[in-house]
Image (cartoon, rainbow, N blue to C red):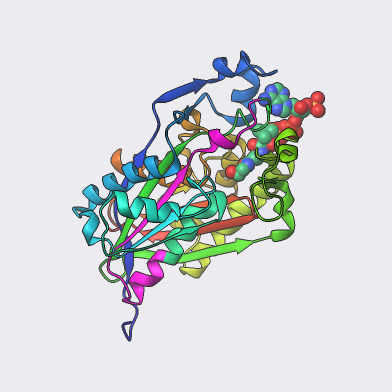
Amino acid sequence: MKDTLRPAGIVGLGSQLPGEVVTNADLTKVLDTTEEWILTRTGISERRKASKEEAASDLGTQAALKALEDAGLKGDDVDLVIVATITPDMAFPSTACLIQHKIGASHAAAFDLSAACSGFIYGLAVGSQFVANGTYDTVLVVATEVLSKILDPEDRTTSILFGDGAGAAVIRPVDQGEGFLAFDLGSKGEGGDLLKLPAGGSRKPTSLETIKEKEHFIKMSGNEVFKFAVKIMGDAAVKALEKAGLNKQDIDYLIPHQANIRIIESAVKRLKLSPEKVYINLDKYGNMSGASIPVALDEAARKNHIKKGDRVVLVGFGAGLTWGSCVINWSI
Ligand code: UT7
């Protein structure tokens, strides 16, 4: 470890989306819903669905390879792989170990992290500490979700909302004053029942009974999560800004968790941001949990919405309940 902390920042980004597109019209054929309800209540037009054979590590590996290429690095340069996911290939080994092997990160440490939709920001917070204190030079943070595999196809409140995808970021030392300026992470475990996968863990191992009760699928109290989200998105963004010695006016670009257009609009209103400073892609991909933010960040960067020196705010919330935000002085 170094005596003094060094600045850490994102130096490469990548994302991967599965090929199958599921439109709102497709969903009206199997669910009691309408295209208009889905679009007006969520802002989503379509989402992506992984194939039967595709798992979280497959999407995550592709996103990771693209992020490494973007950074001009190879798998062997990576010191640590952190994977944020709630849909791991299996309980163990970790999806991080599977990706570490597939990308040829032969000397890297690897572990998974579980913070649901806030997972990517938690991953950045953890990964950047290793770079800042000199333990590692190159940390790869991947958020990958195949939520379609844990959705109840008959549940119209969740099936319409979630999609599959993966995003990745490479963290390395950057110049003084650049990179991550502040993080705000939080949790509220008493809200855990609002969004959960009840069976398949040590509390309730999978059995014929749990399958009959559909407890291997996501259960969500959408409206309660919605109320929590509306409050926490603005609060968390402001807290990270305060920790960085900044305020709302200093935001050059906002990447919010892509959960529901009404949640994003309320956060944008609270932060008094003009729409061109906010990246929204949930119309195309739905809510990809932890993968939403890195996929949006990758797209925004590729479209040159973000430039060197911009103060970029990432903010998300999710099951746990958890939330996370960070302020970045963009360095690439
Ligand atoms: O990433 C973090 C994870 N989760 C979230 O961010 C979820 C946040 N919550 C939401 O996005 C919204 O709560 C939903 C989109 C899930 C639901 O929207 P809502 O406006 O909160 O609807 P609601 O649950 O209050 O339900 C209103 C009505 C109900 O009918 P009644 O009881 O008023 O007759 C629902 O049964 O809408 C009905 N409904 C639907 N109708 C047509 C619920 N889902 C649908 C549907 N199509 N797909």
- The x, y position of residue 158, in whole percent, is 64, 33
Q: What number of labels is visible?
A: 0
**What quarter of the picture does the C terminus occupy?**
bottom left
Residue furthest out toward the bottom: 3
Residue furthest out toward the front: 208
- Ligand 1: give its quadrant: top right
- The x, y position of residue 178, in whole percent, is 31, 65
In the image, is residue 56 above or below residue 177? Answer: above
69 lies left or right of 215: left
Q: Is residue 292 magenta?
A: no
Q: Is residue 266 visible?
A: no
| Front one among 226 and 73 | 73
Task: Give the residues in magenta.
Answer: 127-153
Residue at x 38%, y 51% (from the top left corner) = 98
| Front one among 230 and 9 | 9
| Front one among 294 and 112 | 112
Residue at x 22%, y 48% (from the top left corner) = 69
